[in-house]
Image (cartoon, coloured by chain):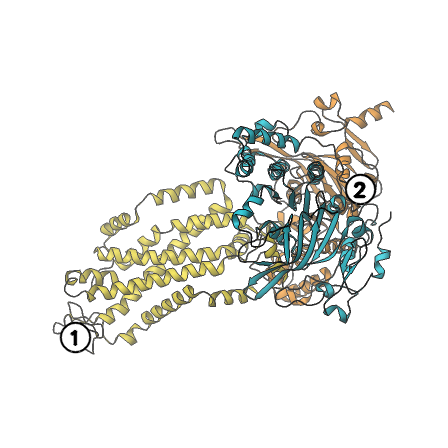
Chain colours: A yellow, B orange, C cyan
Amino acid sequence: MARDIDTLAEEIQGPSPAAILRRRVFGHYGLLFGATALLVIVALAVLAPLLAGHDPYAQSLVARMKPPFWMEGSDPNHLLGTDHLGRDYLARLLYGARISLAIGLIAALISGLIGTTMGVAAGYFGGRVDLVVTFLVNVRLAMPVVLVALAVVAVLGGSLQVVIVVLGFLLWDRFAVVMRSSTLQVRGLEYVNAAKAIGCSTRRIILSEIMPNILNNLIVVMTLEMAHAILLEAALSFLGLGVQPPTPSWGLMISEGKQMMLFEPWVIAIPGVALFILVLAINLLGDGLRDITAPENRS
Amino acid sequence: MSAAGSSPPVLELAGVTKTYRVKQGLFSKPKPLQAVGGVDLRIRKKDVLGLVGESGCGKSTLAKILLGLEAPTSGRVMVDGIEAAGQDRTLLARRIQPIFQDPYSSLNPRKSIEDIIALPLVVHKVGDSAGRAQAVSKMLDLVGLPQRVRRGYPNQLSGGQRQRVAIARALVMKPEIVICDEPTSALDVSVQSQILNLLGDLREELSLTYLFISHNLAVVEHLATRVAVMYLGRIVEEAPAADLFAEPRHPYTKALLASVLTPDPSMSVPDTHLGASYPNPIAPPGGCHFHPRCAAVRDICKTVPPPHVSSAEGHVDCHLYAERTQAA
Amino acid sequence: MSEEPILAVEGLTIDIPMAQGTLHAVRGIDFELNRGETLCIVGESGSGKSLTSLAVMGLLPKRLECAARKLAFRGTELQGLPASAMRQLRGNRMAMIFQEPMTSLNPAYTIGDQLAEALLLHRRVSKAEARARAVELLGKVGITAAGSRLSQYPHQLSGGLRQRVMIAMALMCEPELVIADEPTTALDVTIQAQILRLLVDLQREMNMAMILVTHDLGVVARVADKVAVMYAGEVVEQGTAKEIFGHPSHPYTQGLLRCIPVPGRTKPGEHLGSIPGIVPSLIGKVEGCAFRTRCDLAESACAKPVPIHRTQGGHAWRCIHSRTKKADTERMPA
């Protein structure tokens, strides 16, 4: 029914894809908020040495458990106060952002590479390749991520590198599923047949005909898995099996603050709110990207 | 257009078949579906062979075989007398190029018009970037598109303009044969005539040979020099276009021609006498495949496959004409 | 005709709010349809022909703004009619046949269920009666072994059969008005001829009024009593089929007729006529003749409001030229 409307709109010489994208970006408040928040967090993390003013590892027995600036008895030297070892909380928060971002990004890249390769191969080649990939995805989905991560970390010992690699090798399932179905969809379109008839190699067809048209889905899954990885790292660190002290990780900060929780709730509220804002920002960004890259209406 | 043998065929199909295995249920054994059943065709240079038939008759499968997108189950495809199966697909791609039906899905939406038209040159490593840019300009002129569209993207163009881009892409490698698969059926009437005119002009200018697949017989009559009528995977009649439209022989061809609706308000909707619907290709009717729908059916048609009756200018597969030649 | 027309439309406009402004998709069209008549609305994509048919059925998407001086079905004004009253009419006294039978039939229900639904909804009948009527109509639309088809699902039928089922469904309640939107576009030529013939026969038999929306001039010529040619949201020419094809008077109609190859009239291989350019944007204010950008008879006067010429027979066209010179040369050979 919408057909006539769409063709009408299309007869008008349309703006370029870049112009459409620009218009959509600036009309999408969720995306703008998410992107801005994420940019701010990235900037804070990158500029941490300049902004922190303190060494995140430096302990001070005299300056233990200083409250943040909005509470009585705060120290203007420690805006967000200090933890139970007298380390500056702002410095630990800023350096912790680096850990969270690094884990989210690298784990999502590793799992994205694995999942996209499997998904695109399954979707494009079909047949046996598809059967094998589908089987692997099912096997992977049958494994509880947190338990497997706990087991691996327990055996190998917790460290930043181990956590990143474990998460990277566990979170590829959604990439594989989404990329497989996107590829299947694009593979049937005639421009792929046209490329084959031109004599394009399989490599070129996948890289230059299929990938650019499924990239939007990839980016969306990438943001979701990044948020997922950040939360999982926090959970693992909280359980003591992730990043090890004294590294400043938000999960670890919450974990270390939990004895103090009833008396000094800000100790866990500050890293908790940071985690919340970061994950929300990434998810809003992902949602927005999905909306603005959705294909133009046309039958 | 003259009698066979005057010039060697640029494209020749000999006994080409394509059988798919179709699974109907979860546990049933796959059944063979013969999409193309023993097709012999010869297309000479500068000919336009119109291939007509209903959907499911195998004409699109035949096009895919010619483009190298599907391998025939048996039979030979020869280009300039050289068997295509032995050749690299890239060699074939230089000689045979397609124009697809839907200009909305046949152009990659993420590529600029220039990149789309230049892609065959890039793939076959023809010329440097300056040479390619020049070739693109030439093609744009040739298909009647303004130069300013080269930096544009498919979504900025109308359906007719997109189809012109598709034609430019098909012709940039200077192929000899162009497979046009319903090139105008997705377009508006006023645009359709522009594309048909363009295809006609390009054939003259570049000495192209077309395989023109269409269900619109008025369009086929307008453009084709020869016509092949396909039914359930077989070519049931082939003849020069003028002869076939003036005097159709096969009952199916007659029915097809009768169903063409010319814009003549003094006539009403014709009765094609094609009672039953298109048969299931997995279980084709015995004897002549067309017999359940044929107005001139006889007993022999139900059991014996029709003979191949050749004439100087073509052939027809039908029992009606076998008897006549035997009697003569 | 002293009888009240089945459908009377005056000054119908449809606006589509868009990011860049309002798109005036249909801009003031009038037509009338009497019992037993077939009106063909012909036009290219973007002409507003499908929107017009949806507007009559009250099926336009909500975000579109539709207004008319008059939109009356048998004297009853449809605008402002409560939704329940509209539902009483739809499927009962007016019915619609869509282009794509696969998407307009519900894949989850059997043919029998879907056929009986309208009847059970609008008439006090038992299930057995509805079933009997379904079998009767399937027979009428030329489906053999109708009884066994009732328990089949849409995907088990071929395209031609599905379109026959759609037609049977539309006719279950013996509507007075049937609107068919490109009913044969998705079908093969042979099936197209069969379906059209069926539609025409049934329409005569049941003495229905029919609106057929199509882009195919061949279909129009063979089926229509009256023809309305639409371009860019306006009816540019209206008249009987004989008048439209015999004396096309609007340059657009003339151009369209020159564009199609006609066996026996156009010479194979010769250039077909064409209409250069594209449909103009209908966003924002549209003034004067919308076709002037593509018309070789355009003058400066075309940018001002265009008069409508009428002959005594009711043939009307919207053009500054009373009858263009080309009209006479374009006459079809009798």
Asked whether residue B11 is in view, the answer is no
Percent coordinates x, y for residue C212 in the rendering = 68, 46
User: Quarter holding the C terminus of chain B?
Assistant: top right
Q: Secondary structure at mark 2?
A: loop
**Number of residues whose C-alpha sits closer than 10 Å to that of mark 2, classed few (under 14), some (14–19) or many (20 or more):** few
Q: Which residue is at a point 47% across and 49% down the rendered structure image?
A: A120
Q: Is residue A80 above or below residue B172?
A: below
- Quadrant hosting residue A28: bottom left
Seen from the viewer's position, the closer of residues A247 and B297 is B297
Mark in front: 2 vs 1: 2
Asked whether residue A105 is in view, the answer is yes
Chain bearing tag 1 is A
**Number of residues whose C-alpha sits closer than 10 Å to that of mark 1, classed few (under 14), some (14–19) or many (20 or more):** few
In this rendering, the count of numbered labels is 2
Label placed on residue A72: 1
Q: Are marks 2 and 1 on the same chain?
A: no
Q: Secondary structure at mark 1?
A: loop
Pointer 2: what residue? B267
Percent coordinates x, y for residue A22 in the rendering = 50, 67
Amino acid found under the numbered disc labelled 2: Met
Q: Is residue A16 above or below residue B2?
A: below
